[in-house]
Amino acid sequence: MPSADGSLLPLCRLDSLEVGEARLVQLGARSLMVYRADSDAVQVYLNRCPHLGIPLTWYDDLLWDPQHKHLQCLTHGALFLPQNGACVSGPCRGDSLWCISSTIEGGDIVVDAAELPPPASGEN
Ligand code: FES
């Protein structure tokens, strides 16, 4: 369901992600993490660590911990469950990634522009 102003923003094609894969997507000034949880289920998070408010990572190949079980913050090593964004280890344990609801529209993963938080300082 689009926002009142109808601004649905496509992130990427659902079929461009394997189940269990995550990717960074730049959307204007914001960096988002898209995780494909299942054949038709995705989670979208703001790429902003709740510890210091900076990106977890800048590289797709460094999104995961070595076991490929948790999304990780490169700065201090916080670990997050990809299924719900909960931090399970690190200085922000008990906190969560900022989850942005998404839908699949015609095979595209889309988010509602109205759901995006304001850019943090340092983001253009
Ligand atoms: S900035 Fe992410 S754990 Fe400290």
Image: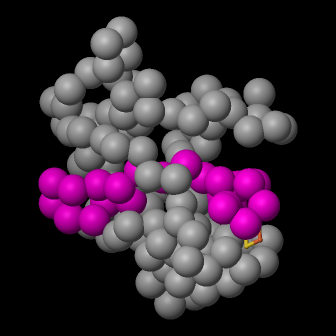
- The answer to which of 41 and 1 lies nearer the viewer is 1
Q: Residue furthest bottom?
A: 67
Q: Residue at x 38, y 59 (%)?
A: 35
For residue 13, which quarter of the picture?
top left
Rendered position, 105 above or below 18: above
The image's colour scheme reads one colour
Q: Residue furthest top?
A: 5
Q: Quadrant of the N terminus?
A: top left
Highlighted range, magenta: 35-59
Residue 48 is a magenta residue: yes
Rendered position, 6 above or below 44: above
**Residue 76: in sight, yes or no?**
yes
Q: Where is residue 115 drawn, in percent x and y?
A: 44, 33
Q: Residue furthest front?
A: 94
Q: Residue at x 51, y 33 (%)?
A: 116
Q: Quadrant of the C terminus?
A: top right
Q: Where is residue 55 drawn, in percent x and y?
A: 70, 55
Q: Where is residue 12 drawn, in percent x and y?
A: 37, 39
Q: How many marks?
A: 0
The secondary structure that dominates the magenta segment is: loop
Residue 29 is a magenta residue: no
Ligand 1: give its quadrant: bottom right
Q: Residue at x 31, y 13 (%)?
A: 4
Would residue 1 appear left or right of 98 to someone viewing this image? left
Q: Residue at x 66, y 62 (%)?
A: 50
**Residue 13: in sight, yes or no?**
no
Rendered position, 14 above or below 3: below
